[in-house]
Image (spheres, rainbow, N blue to C red):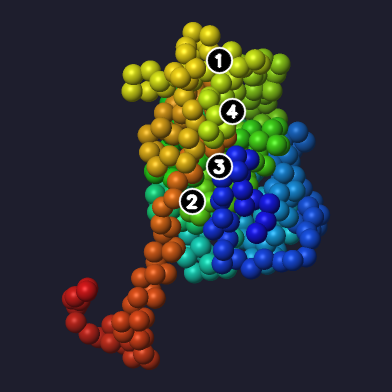
Amino acid sequence: MTAIDNDLNGRDLGLTSYSDVPHTDTPQKAKDFTSDQEVRWCPGCGDYVILATVRSFLPELGIRKENLMFVSGIGCSSRFPYYLDAYGIHSIHGRAPAIATGLAVTRPDLSVWVVTGDGDALSIGGNHLIHALRRNVNITILLFNNRIYGLTKGQYSPTSEVGKVTKSTPMGSVDHPFNALSLALGAEASFVARAIDSDRAGLTEVLRAAAAHRGASFVEILQDCPIFNDGSFDVLRKADAEQRLIRLVHGEPIRFGADGEFCVVRKGFGLAVGRSDEFAHTDIVVHDAYSDDPEYAYLLSRLSDQDLNHVVTGIFRSADRQTYDDGVRAQLAAARERKPIGPDALQNLLTGRETWTVR
C-alpha cells in the first residue's frame, strides 16, 4: 500500500487500479522519472507545471518505471512521454485512447496513462475518447485544455469560447464550445475531475484519486498557452479568484468565496449559485463525489461556463463499475475453460461453419 490508499477525506480507495501492477520497495524521487531529453515547450507554458507535478507525484505510486506507460496523441501536450523516464508512445492524432485500450486489455501489469489536449482529444479523437470512457477502460486520461491549437500556431479549438478571434476565425468563432467534463459525464465516465495548472496542491490531490480509481479516470487540466492564448485563465489566478473558483470537497457543503459567502443550492431540477446568507444551511448542497447518480455530477459540470464566471474544480464523480479490460479477460478465461484452444483451432475457425451458437 502507498500514500494514495486514502483520499484527503479518509475514504479507503484500496489502490485497486494497480493491484496487478508490480511495485518496488526502493524509494523513488522525482529525478528518477526525469528523462535526459531537452524540454521544448515555450517559456511560460502551463505544461511545465503539469510535468513537474506528475514527476513529483509518480514516486508515491511505488510502481516500477518499466510498468508505467504514457500514451499521447499529437499536440504540444503530447510531447509529454519524451520528458518522463518511463515507457511511452507518441502515437497518432486523436488515437491515444484506442492504443491505451489495447495495452490495458492485454497488459494488466501496466499502469496506463493517456496525455492529450483539447484539440487532440475533443476534435479528431472525440470518438475514441467517448468510447474509452463509456467502456470504462482501466486508464488514466489527462486532458490539457488551453482552449487553442498551440502546435499548429493558434487556430480555435473545440473548447474555444464563442467569439474567439484566431487565425482560423478572424471574425470570431461561431461554434459553441465543448464543456469537457459534461462530455465525459455524458459518456458515463466513472471518474471525472478538474484541476488548474497553477494549483499544484489541487492537481496532486486529483491525480492521487485518479490513479487510485479502477476504471477510466478523466482529468481536465486548465492550462495557459502564453504564445497563442496568453492569459486565457488569468481570472482564476487573480485576487478575486475565490469568487469564481468552486472547490469540491467530498462530504462538505459547497461554499466558496474568500469567507464562504457564496454557495451552491438546488434550483428546480438543477443547481445554482447563490449567497450563503440568503439560504439555510440545510439548503446548501453537500458534495458527494461517490454518488452512483451521474446526473448530480453532470449538474455540477454545468455550473462552469465559457466566461469563467464560475469554475468548479476537484473530484466530480468517482463511481465503481466493471472495467472493460476485466470483462474481456474474464470472457477469455471462461472460453479457455469451456474448450481448450488447440493447434487446429484457427484452421477450424477458418474452414468451419459460417454460423456459431453462443452458449
Q: Is residue 308 visible?
A: no
Tell me the kind of residue under disc 3: Val
Tag 4, which secondary structure?
strand
Give the residue pinned by disc 1.
Answer: 262
Badge 1: how crowded within 10 Å, few (<14), some, or many (20+)? many
Q: Earlier in the sequence, mark 2 or mark 4?
A: 2
At which x and y percent is residue 286?
Answer: 49, 28
Per the image, the residue denoted by label 3 is 219
Which comes sooner in the sequence, label 3 or label 1? 3
Q: Is residue 100 left or right of residue 66?
A: left
Q: Dot 2 surroundings within 10 Å: few (below 14), some, or many (20 or more)?
A: many
Find disc 2 in the rendering and name its residue: 216
Foreground of the two, 357 or 319: 319
Q: Quadrant of residue 231?
A: top right
Q: Is residue 321 shown left or right of residue 25? A: left
Q: Nearer the viewer, residue 51 or 321?
A: 321
CB contact under 8 Å: marks 3 and 2: no
Q: Find residue 198 and report its horizontal and vertical position in percent.
A: 70, 32
> Alpha carbon of mark 3 to alpha carbon of mark 1: how far?
25 Å
Q: Which residue is mark 4?
A: 247
Relative vertical location of residue 351 with respect to residue 129 in this rendering, above or below: below
Residue 255 versus residue 49 in the image, above or below: above
Residue 319: image x %, image y %?
A: 45, 46
Residue 113: x and y in percent read 58, 54
